[in-house]
Image (spheres, rainbow, N blue to C red):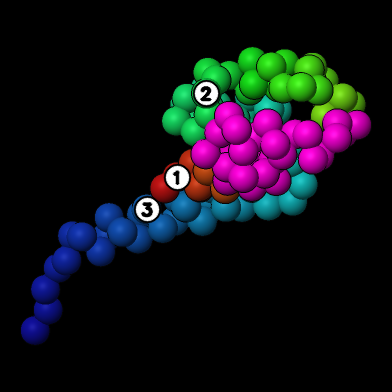
Amino acid sequence: MSFKMNGLDELAKELKQISKNAQALAGTHEYSFDEIFPNKFMLENTNFSTIEEFLLSSPEKISSNEELEKADETILDTFVSEQTKFSTWEEMLSTATESLIIDRLGF
Protein backbone atom coordinates (compact mmCIF):
# COMPACT_ATOMS: atom_id res chain seq x y z
CA MET A 1 0.00 0.00 0.00
CA SER A 2 1.34 3.44 -0.89
CA PHE A 3 0.10 6.96 -1.30
CA LYS A 4 1.50 10.23 -2.55
CA MET A 5 1.65 13.41 -0.50
CA ASN A 6 2.18 16.45 -2.70
CA GLY A 7 2.50 18.74 0.31
CA LEU A 8 5.68 17.03 1.44
CA ASP A 9 7.23 17.45 -1.98
CA GLU A 10 6.57 21.18 -1.80
CA LEU A 11 7.94 21.33 1.77
CA ALA A 12 11.09 19.48 0.71
CA LYS A 13 11.56 21.94 -2.16
CA GLU A 14 11.17 24.93 0.19
CA LEU A 15 13.56 23.43 2.75
CA LYS A 16 16.14 22.85 0.00
CA GLN A 17 15.85 26.52 -1.04
CA ILE A 18 16.19 27.70 2.58
CA SER A 19 19.29 25.51 2.92
CA LYS A 20 20.74 27.01 -0.25
CA ASN A 21 20.00 30.52 1.03
CA ALA A 22 21.62 29.69 4.39
CA GLN A 23 24.79 28.54 2.63
CA ALA A 24 24.91 31.87 0.79
CA LEU A 25 24.78 33.65 4.17
CA ALA A 26 27.61 31.58 5.66
CA GLY A 27 30.84 33.41 6.37
CA THR A 28 31.45 37.11 6.82
CA HIS A 29 29.43 39.65 4.88
CA GLU A 30 29.20 43.41 4.85
CA TYR A 31 25.79 44.98 4.48
CA SER A 32 24.96 48.63 3.96
CA PHE A 33 22.70 50.47 6.38
CA ASP A 34 20.09 50.56 3.61
CA GLU A 35 20.14 46.75 3.48
CA ILE A 36 19.99 46.35 7.25
CA PHE A 37 17.44 49.13 7.75
CA PRO A 38 15.17 49.12 4.68
CA ASN A 39 12.58 51.87 4.45
CA LYS A 40 9.82 49.42 5.40
CA PHE A 41 11.62 48.59 8.66
CA MET A 42 12.16 52.27 9.42
CA LEU A 43 8.55 53.21 8.72
CA GLU A 44 7.21 50.36 10.87
CA ASN A 45 9.58 50.87 13.81
CA THR A 46 10.68 54.51 13.93
CA ASN A 47 9.45 58.05 13.39
CA PHE A 48 11.58 58.25 10.25
CA SER A 49 11.30 56.89 6.72
CA THR A 50 14.99 56.15 6.12
CA ILE A 51 18.04 55.23 8.18
CA GLU A 52 19.88 58.26 6.78
CA GLU A 53 17.13 60.61 8.01
CA PHE A 54 17.17 58.90 11.40
CA LEU A 55 20.94 59.15 11.86
CA LEU A 56 21.17 62.75 10.63
CA SER A 57 18.33 63.74 12.98
CA SER A 58 20.07 62.24 15.99
CA PRO A 59 21.82 64.57 18.45
CA GLU A 60 25.09 63.20 17.07
CA LYS A 61 24.16 64.15 13.46
CA ILE A 62 25.65 60.89 12.15
CA SER A 63 26.47 60.81 8.44
CA SER A 64 29.11 58.06 8.21
CA ASN A 65 30.20 54.77 9.73
CA GLU A 66 33.12 56.54 11.36
CA GLU A 67 30.80 59.03 13.07
CA LEU A 68 28.57 56.19 14.24
CA GLU A 69 31.55 54.39 15.77
CA LYS A 70 32.53 57.60 17.61
CA ALA A 71 28.99 58.45 18.73
CA ASP A 72 28.18 58.56 22.43
CA GLU A 73 26.18 55.37 22.97
CA THR A 74 24.19 56.84 25.87
CA ILE A 75 23.03 59.78 23.75
CA LEU A 76 22.21 57.48 20.83
CA ASP A 77 20.29 55.08 23.11
CA THR A 78 18.21 57.97 24.47
CA PHE A 79 17.41 59.10 20.93
CA VAL A 80 16.49 55.53 19.93
CA SER A 81 14.20 55.11 22.93
CA GLU A 82 12.44 58.40 22.16
CA GLN A 83 12.10 57.95 18.39
CA THR A 84 11.65 54.20 17.86
CA LYS A 85 9.98 51.10 19.28
CA PHE A 86 13.36 50.07 20.74
CA SER A 87 15.12 50.85 24.00
CA THR A 88 18.68 50.94 22.67
CA TRP A 89 20.66 51.21 19.45
CA GLU A 90 21.91 47.65 19.97
CA GLU A 91 18.32 46.35 20.21
CA MET A 92 17.35 48.22 17.05
CA LEU A 93 20.40 46.95 15.16
CA SER A 94 19.87 43.36 16.35
CA THR A 95 16.21 43.35 15.35
CA ALA A 96 16.98 44.81 11.92
CA THR A 97 19.77 42.28 11.38
CA GLU A 98 17.48 39.40 12.35
CA SER A 99 14.87 40.67 9.89
CA LEU A 100 17.51 40.86 7.15
CA ILE A 101 18.64 37.29 7.79
CA ILE A 102 15.08 35.95 7.88
CA ASP A 103 14.36 37.73 4.61
CA ARG A 104 17.56 36.43 2.99
CA LEU A 105 16.75 32.89 4.11
CA GLY A 106 13.43 33.16 2.29
CA PHE A 107 10.97 33.01 5.17
In this view, which residue lies farthest toward the bottom? 1
Q: Is residue 70 magenta?
A: yes
Type of amino acid at the residue the image marks with label 3 = Glu
Which residue, given by chain and number where applicable, does mark 2 sit on? 47
Q: Earlier in the sequence, mark 2 or mark 1?
A: 2
Which residue, given by chain and number where applicable, does mark 1 sit on? 106
Q: Is residue 43 above or below residue 76?
A: above
The x and y percentages for residue 104 are 53, 42
The x and y percentages for residue 15 are 41, 58
Q: Is residue 100 visible?
A: no
Q: Earlier in the sequence, mark 3 or mark 2?
A: 3
The label on residue 15 is none
Type of amino acid at the residue the image marks with label 1 = Gly
Image side of residue 82 versus residue 60, left or right: left
Image side of residue 93 versus residue 86, left or right: right
**Magenta-highlighted residues:** 69-97
Q: Secondary structure at mark 2?
A: loop
Q: Earlier in the sequence, mark 1 or mark 3?
A: 3
Q: Is residue 60 above or below residue 23?
A: above
Image side of residue 80 versus residue 75, left or right: left
Which residue is painted at 53% across and 51% down in the image? 20
Q: Nearer the viewer, mark 2 or mark 1?
A: 2
How far apart are labels 1 and 3 at the CA level? 9 Å
Which residue, given by chain and number where applicable, does mark 3 sit on? 14
